[in-house]
Amino acid sequence: MNAKVNITNRAGASFPVRRMQFDFNNVPEYWMDGSAGLTHFMTALSALFPAGEKFFIDSVRAVRQHPAIKDNEALQKEISGFIGQEAMHTHEHANFNASAQKFGHDVDCLEQYTHTAIQSFRKSAAFMGKPFGITQQMIDLIGTTALEHFTATIASELLRNEHIQALMTDETMKTMWLWHAVEENEHKAVAYDVFENVFGKGVKAYVARTGGLALAMVVLFLVQSYFVARLLKEDNQLNIESLKDIYTYGYSPSKGIISGMGKEMLAYFKPGFHPNDLDTVSLLEHWKAKLGF
Ligand SMILES: [Fe+2]
Ligand SMILES: [Fe+2]
């Protein structure tokens, strides 16, 4: 493996925290098979992670001492593991984002934009929810639970989609994305379990979490697409070839990573849904063995 890895499980969760140390110095500019379109598509996702995953950590931390879960020893261990994994993802993505800066791709600015967008969105949502008894903590947890479903789903799709894997021609970047994908599936139930324990399984909780997912997906699509367009434009690569690559491997029915997510994304709308209903156990075993975890 082309990264230093230190695996610990001090929290005693059902999954470990892998401290990775990737060296991004030799990652080529267009590391997705030489395609500017696909590289910027992935970089736009990466730009969302530092502020996004910090938001997930903060949201779960804010309710950690809630009476409904304070003494739930097993869930507390899972929360610690979740925080540990997300903190490592933030760290490595921030390092990659900083390394892309040397090619003139201003990912730093997109990270700042993500932070501002999250903060203004969560505060406005809490303001609008106040008359209905919806608190800031609930808004944050609804958003986190929805976005964790998205990350787990895009991650399992990445672990299955051989077209995308074949395009990841740079070993460092491939390992980073696959490591992140494995861990998103290992901890996919944590935010959901916290949400359910704190806010219950009633009609109000159902409407909140499904409405939250629908809204989060619209915002995420708009922000990520804006980031891609901006990276491409600043790089003078906003052309048919780039857009064709993004369509083929992002959105086309046969090869697209986003279009492949449809069924699993919709499962979230089933009353009584739980993230572990989507079985990724053997998929994770396969990849953990392959990555030497
Ligand atoms: Fe993550
Ligand atoms: Fe996550």
Image (tube, rainbow, N blue to C red):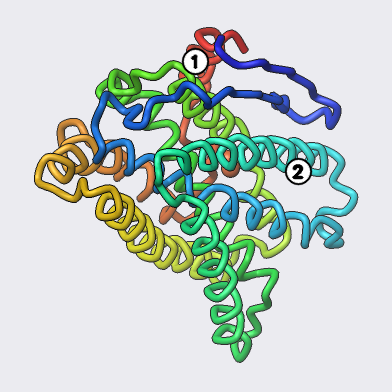
x and y percent of residue 102 in the render? 46, 39
Q: Would you call the spot at circle 1 few (<14 residues within 10 Å), some (14-19), or many (20 or more)?
A: some
Judged left or right of residue 158, residue 72 is right
Q: Amino acid at mark 2?
A: Ile
Q: CA distance from mark 1 to mark 2?
A: 23 Å
Q: Which quadrant of the figure shows ligand 1?
A: top right
The image quarter containing residue 116 is: bottom right
Circle 2: element type? helix
x and y percent of residue 143 in the render? 55, 62
Looking at the picture, does residue 195 appear above or below residue 91?
below
Judged left or right of residue 289, residue 191 is right
Which of the two residues, 234 or 34, is positioned nearer the viewer here? 234
Which label number is shown at residue 229?
none
Residue at 48 percent of width and 66 percent of height = 212
Residue at 55 percent of width and 78 percent of height = 125
Q: Amino acid at mark 1?
A: Trp
Which is more N-terminal, label 2 or label 1? 2
Circles 1, 2 touching at the beta carbon (< 8 Å): no
Q: Quadrant of the C terminus?
A: top right
Residue at 75 percent of width and 35 percent of height = 81
Residue annotated with mark 2 = 79
Q: Residue placed farthest to the bottom in the image?
A: 131
x and y percent of residue 129 in the render? 57, 83
Circle 1: element type? helix
Q: Would you call the spot at circle 2 few (<14 residues within 10 Å), some (14-19), or many (20 or more)?
A: many
Which of the two residues, 207 or 87, is positioned nearer the viewer here? 87
